[in-house]
Image (cartoon, rainbow, N blue to C red):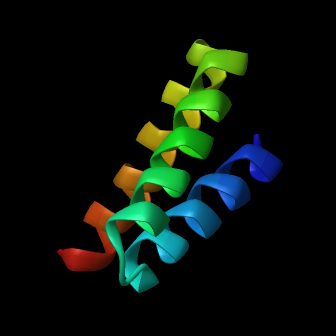
Amino acid sequence: MNELKAKIKSLAKRNRLATTDEERAAVAAEMSTLRSENEQAFTEALEALMAHIILLCF
């Protein structure tokens, strides 16, 4: 799961740094591919990242 979380974080960073619609679309396509490979694991990894962020905020 750590590898999947790292990939999600990397794609999220690339999306934040994207300056064109084409770059954002490429990141979205990669994120969609990643999700379709194993939707359950993707969801669990994303939820774990969100929980971590929430804990940092409060």
Depth check, front residue: 18 or 9: 18
Q: Residue at x 21, y 77 (%)?
A: 57
Q: Residue at x 58, y 16 (%)?
A: 39
Apparent side of residue 49 relative to residue 11 in the rendered image (left or right): left
Q: Position of residue 38 (x, y in %)?
A: 69, 16
Relative to 28, say whether 44 is above or below.
above
| Quarter of the figure with the N terminus | top right
Q: Residue at x 44, y 85 (%)?
A: 17
Q: Quadrant of residue 21?
A: bottom left
Apparent side of residue 57 relative to residue 24 in the rendered image (left or right): left
Depth check, front residue: 23 or 49: 23
Q: Position of residue 2 (x, y in %)?
A: 77, 51
Relative to 16, say whether 6 is above or below.
above
Relative to 13, say whether 17 is above or below.
below
Q: Residue furthest right?
A: 3
| Quarter of the figure with the C terminus | bottom left
Apparent side of residue 42 relative to residue 7 in the rendered image (left or right): left
Q: Position of residue 3 (x, y in %)?
A: 82, 50
